[in-house]
Image (cartoon, rainbow, N blue to C red):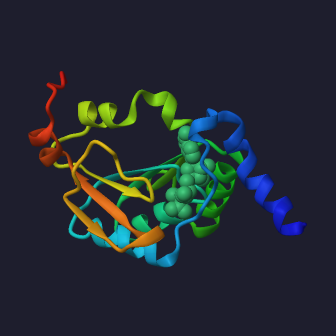
Amino acid sequence: MGAYGLWTLFALPGFRKVPTYLKVPYLPSSKTQTQNVMKLLHGRAGCLADLGSGDGRLVFAATVEGFQCTGFEINYILTGYARVKAKWKGIPSSTASFINQDFWKMEVLGRKLEKELPDEARVIACRFPFPDWTPTATVGDGLDQAWAYDMNAIRKLSTHTIMR
Ligand SMILES: C[S@@+](CC[C@H](N)C(=O)[O-])C[C@H]1O[C@@H](n2cnc3c(N)ncnc32)[C@H](O)[C@@H]1O
C-alpha cells in the first residue's frame, strides 16, 4: 500500500495532463541506461535538454560530465523534487535547472527539433526511439537501450524541406 501510495503521488500528476494515448508512467533510468546515455554523449560538450527529466538523475549525471542542463518535466512533484535534489547537491541553477512543462505542447517534437537544433546537435532517446528518424548510434538493449540521432545526418536523410 505504501509503495502504491508513493507511486501515485509521483506518477498521477503526469497522467492527468497527458492525453490518454500519450500517458507515460514514471520509469526512472537504471544505472546501466544512464551509463549508455553518457557513452552516447562521450566527447561532446555544451547544453543538454532532458525531455521528461523525472527526478533529474540523467541531468545530474550529465552535469558531472560538464554539460549545462535543463530538465523539462510534466509532473510538478518530480520537478520540485529534482530542484530540491539539485540544491542539496550544491548544483547552481546555471548548471542544472528544471522546468515544469508538457513537452507535447511544444509542437510536434521531431519537427520542432529538426527546425530549431543546430547541425552539430545530438538527440538521445531512451525507451521510445523516434519512428521517422534513422539513428546514428545505439547502445544497450531491452529497456536500457538508448538511441542517438545526429541532426546533420537526420537533415541529410530528411525528405521534406525544413524552413529555419
Ligand atoms: C521514463 S521517465 C524518465 C525519467 C528520467 N529522464 C530518467 O532518466 O530517470 C519519463 C518521464 O517523462 C515525464 N513525462 C511524460 N510525458 C511528459 C510530457 N508530455 N512532458 C513532460 N514530461 C513528461 C514523466 O512524468 C516521467 O518523469
Left or right of 140? Residue 161 is left
Q: Considering depth in this image, is 108 or 122 the residue closer to the camera?
A: 108
Q: Taking 62 as reference, is 99 left or right?
A: right
Can residue 91 be spotted in the picture?
A: no
Does residue 10 lie above or below 20 as drawn? below
Q: Position of residue 69 (x, y in %)?
A: 42, 54
Can residue 31 be seen? yes
Residue at 27% across / 58% down in the picture? 148
Location of the N terminus (image quadrant): bottom right
Residue 123, image x, y percentages: 30, 51
Q: Based on the displayed image, in which of its 4 quarters is residue 42 positioned?
A: bottom left
Task: Report the side of 26 relative to 128 (left or right).
Answer: right
Tally the numbered discs. Answer: 0
Image coordinates of residue 117 in percent, x first then y, are 25, 39
* Quadrant position of residue 10: bottom right
Residue 164, percent from left and from top: 19, 24
Q: Residue at x 15, y 43 (%)?
A: 119
Tell me which corner region of the image, top left, top right, bottom left or bottom right, holds residue 34: bottom left
Q: Nearer the viewer, residue 33 or 92?
A: 33
Residue drawn at x 58%, y 37% as measured from the top left? 21
Residue positioned most to the top: 163
- Compared to residue 71, the image places residue 161 above or below, namely above
